[in-house]
Image (cartoon, grey):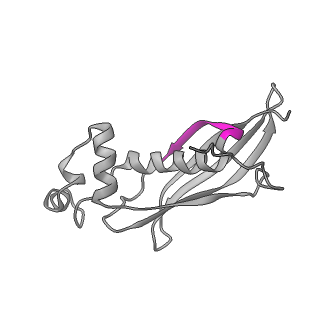
Amino acid sequence: MTDVQTPAASAGEFEVGATVPPFVRTAGLHAWNRYAAVNYEFVDIHMDDEAGRAAGMPGAFGMGNLIWAWMHCAVEQWVGDRGRLEHLECRFKSPALKGDTITITGTVTGRSTADDGGVLLDLELWSENQTGTRTAPGSARVRLQPAD
């Protein structure tokens, strides 16, 4: 097994205005079932189209916390071992429906120096579906490791 190395930050990668690389997933029973298994969240509205319709949706729909988890994954994949995610929040505006392509992305909105010499980044994050509709706006704070 080979160790995976996180590349060094490229110029401007963590500057204000920089983009969090897109993290793309397809919403549907495969993803929802895996998430439910880990979190013991087998709720009918997330597994059964009739239950989803009874709840006012076109069919089964995804867990809001799965979108939050995908946001976490997007930031962790971008930052790697160069820092850590300290805070993440989002607001669910519309559900991920079966077959939706969900993209998590964002931008760096603030950058400051921490007391330990590390760098704090403020992020605006969001999920959007294949039509470009933002389904969950959010924000995060990342602490980058101090330079050696």
Q: Main secondary structure of the magenta part?
A: strand
Give above or below for 91 relative to 25.
Answer: above
Which image quarter is the C terminus in?
Answer: top right
Identify which residue, 55 or 43, lies in the foreground. Answer: 43
Identify which residue, 109 or 74, lies in the foreground. Answer: 74
Q: Is residue 8 left or right of residue 45?
A: right
**Which x, y percent locates residue 90?**
50, 47
| Residue extending farthest top | 116
Q: Residue at x 54, y 56 (%)?
A: 126
Q: Is residue 91 visible?
A: no
Q: Does 21 appear in magenta? A: no
Q: Does 83 appear in magenta? A: yes
Identify which residue, 76 or 98, lies in the foreground. Answer: 76
Give above or below for 100 relative to 105.
Answer: below
Q: Residue at x 74, y 57 (%)?
A: 18
**Which x, y percent locates residue 58?**
23, 67
- Span colored in magenta: 81-91
**Which x, y percent locates residue 146?**
81, 33
**Which x, y percent locates residue 64?**
38, 49
Q: Residue at x 13, y 61 (%)?
A: 50
